[in-house]
Image (cartoon, rainbow, N blue to C red):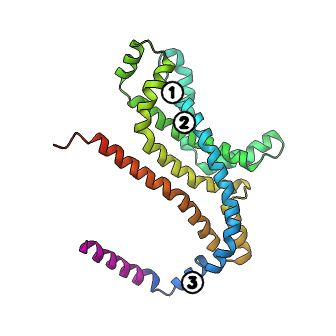
């Protein structure tokens, strides 16, 4: 405890000497951490943040559904399913390799041009997030499914279960425990990336912050938006750490003699 206190004090002194006690800190504080501008910007940024929360809430279900279908298609066995497996693998390769910002441009500006009419930014944002993150989540689900020992499938089939029953009652419940930490990490990443929908003219938190910056010539609204996203992510991060530690403790409970 004494070492922890001393190291914390030393770290505080270093921060004070290298950051706070410098000539440029006052300018940075004025440009990025102005309390008056923060209070003025908070209602507008919060109004835009609700759009980010709406996109995130809808995308949780769309990403989960699409990813589960793709993962199941990739795990189909037999040569007859080769074309389906190839298409599913191509989908995951494409959207895992394509930067999310490019997907936003293609969906946000390309799709309305093809359709020939305006599409709501909420729908475009959900579609872009679903296309990108379903590829990541599908690979996590596929890895979880394939981590279940084949004997579990054989035992289920020996009991008379069909393919769907085996997946639903035997394979997926076991796979879910193993892939939950990775899924929660993807969810944290998705929480951050929904903040990019301002690129497609969505009036989200960043777009509202940008509007306040344009009138106040101060960057504090961006900090306010960042704090809102941090507060959104912290509970999920702590929950992920707790679940990972609990899972590790359960798996290693019999390894210590």
**Within the image, what quadrant is residue 98 found in?**
top right
Residue positioned 56% across, 50% down in the render: 190
- Numbered range of the magenta stretch: 1-18
In space, the residues marked 3 and 1 are separated at their CA atoms by 54 Å
> Of label 3 and label 1, which has the lower sequence position?
3
* Residue 92: image tag: 2
In space, the residues marked 2 and 3 are separated at their CA atoms by 46 Å
Q: Residues within 10 Å of mark 2 (few under 14, many from 20)?
A: many
Q: Pointer 1: what residue?
A: 74
Location of the C terminus (image quadrant)? top left
Is residue 51 within the magenta segment?
A: no
Q: Pointer 3: what residue?
A: 27
Q: Where's residue 211, x and y in %?
A: 73, 68
Question: Which one is nearer the viewer's eye here, 213 or 181?
Answer: 181
- Is residue 51 shown left or right of residue 28? right
Q: Where's residue 154, x and y in %?
A: 38, 17
> Of label 2 and label 3, which has the lower sequence position?
3
The answer to whether the residue labelled 1 contacts the one labelled 2, judged by CB atoms less than 8 Å apart, is yes
> Of label 1 and label 2, which has the lower sequence position?
1
Is residue 3 within the magenta segment?
A: yes
Question: Which one is nearer the viewer's eye here, 215 or 57?
Answer: 57
Residue positioned 25% across, 42% down in the render: 253
Secondary element type, mark 2: helix
* Residue 175: image tag: none
The relative height of residue 198 versus residue 100 in the rendered view (above or below) is below
Secondary element type, mark 1: helix
Q: Report the predominant secondary structure element of the magenta stretch.
A: helix
Residue positioned 54% across, 42% down in the render: 96
């Amino acid at each position: 405890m004494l070492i922890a206190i001393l190291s914390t004090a030393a770290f505080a002194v270093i921060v004070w000497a290298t950051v706070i006690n410098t000539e440029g800190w006052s300018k940075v504080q004025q440009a990025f951490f102005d309390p008056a501008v923060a209070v003025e910007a908070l209602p507008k940024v919060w109004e835009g943040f609700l759009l980010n929360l709406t996109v995130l809430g809808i995308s949780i279900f769309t990403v989960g559904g699409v990813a589960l279908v793709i993962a199941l298609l990739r795990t189909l066995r037999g040569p007859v399913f080769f074309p389906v497996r190839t298409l599913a693998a191509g989908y995951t390769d494409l959207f895992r390799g394509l930067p999310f910002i490019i997907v936003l441009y293609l969906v946000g500006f390309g799709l309305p041009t093809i359709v020939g009419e305006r599409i709501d930014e909420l729908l475009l944002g959900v579609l872009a997030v679903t296309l990108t993150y379903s590829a990541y989540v599908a690979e996590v689900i596929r890895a979880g499914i394939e981590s279940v020992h084949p004997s579990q499938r054989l035992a289920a089939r020996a009991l008379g279960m069909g393919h769907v029953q085996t997946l639903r009652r035997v394979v997926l419940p076991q796979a879910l425990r193993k892939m939950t930490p990775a899924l929660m990490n993807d969810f944290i990443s998705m929480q951050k990336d929904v903040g990019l929908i301002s690129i497609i003219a969505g009036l989200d938190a960043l777009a509202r912050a940008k509007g306040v910056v344009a009138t106040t010539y101060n960057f504090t609204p961006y900090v306010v938006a960042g704090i809102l996203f941090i507060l959104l992510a912290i509970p999920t991060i702590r929950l992920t750490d707790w679940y990972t530690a609990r899972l590790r403790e359960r798996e290693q409970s019999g390894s210590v003699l």
